[in-house]
Image (cartoon, helix red, strand yellow):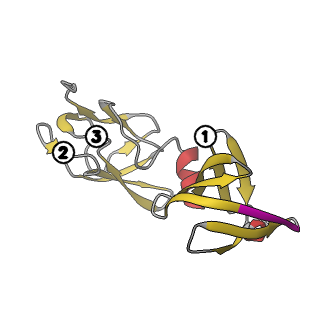
Amino acid sequence: MSKAYKAVANDHITVDLDASDAIASKVSTNGNLVGLHNENKVEATLLNSDFDSRTYSIRLRGNIYNIKIQNKLDQQIEKLGLSLGSESTTNLVDAPMPGLILEVLVKAGDSVESGDGLLVLEAMKMENKLVAPRNGVIKAVHVEASQTVDKGVVLIEFEEDEN
């Protein structure tokens, strides 16, 4: 069976998981986790959880672990060199993969906020909306609709951040 999930603890311990690797079988209201892993009883305390970002902090045997769970999509995004939800100060938006520009949503001089759509790139038969990595003003748009691009090509340039 393929490993559908990856757990990263404290940014350096990586474990590939599938459904049969489930550890916690019961979470009580006080945050205690009790379960079995490889026929061994595991007890931990859930300190923090953010279901939307799939991040958790647990105390296990006196140690605190900050855990990020990645599903298959998260893992593919990481392989492409992209990231979700991370702040950026970059002035350039590059093509994350080769593809066809379907639509350009901004023009030079437009003000955008982090997460606003910039353009739509078709790659591997999927439409991918590329979004602004930060708040700023568009300095230049280097592509147009119906243009094919290679991975790494600069698509959009931001004005220099004055902070």
Q: Position of residue 159 (x, y in %)?
A: 19, 28
Distance between mark 1 and mark 2 Cα atoms = 31 Å
- The amino acid type of the residue labelled 1 equals Asp
Residue 138 lies, with reference to residue 125, above or below; the image says above
> Label 2 belongs to which residue?
112
Q: Position of residue 47 (x, y in %)?
A: 55, 57
- The amino acid type of the residue labelled 2 equals Val
Which is nearer the N-term, disc 2 or disc 3? 2
Q: Quadrant of residue 74?
A: bottom right
Distance between mark 2 and mark 3 Cα atoms = 8 Å
Instruction: Assign a secondary structure to mark 1.
Output: loop
Q: Which residues are magenta?
A: 39-43
**Seen in the image, is 126 located left or right of residue 162?**
right
Q: Residue at x 21, y 46 (%)?
A: 113
Q: How many marks?
A: 3
Q: Between residues 153 and 146, which one lies in front from this camera angle? A: 153
Q: Nearer the viewer, mark 1 or mark 2?
A: 1
**Within-10-Å neighbours for mark 2: few <14, some 14–19, many 20+:** some
Instruction: Assign a secondary structure to mark 2.
Output: strand
> Label 1 belongs to which residue?
11
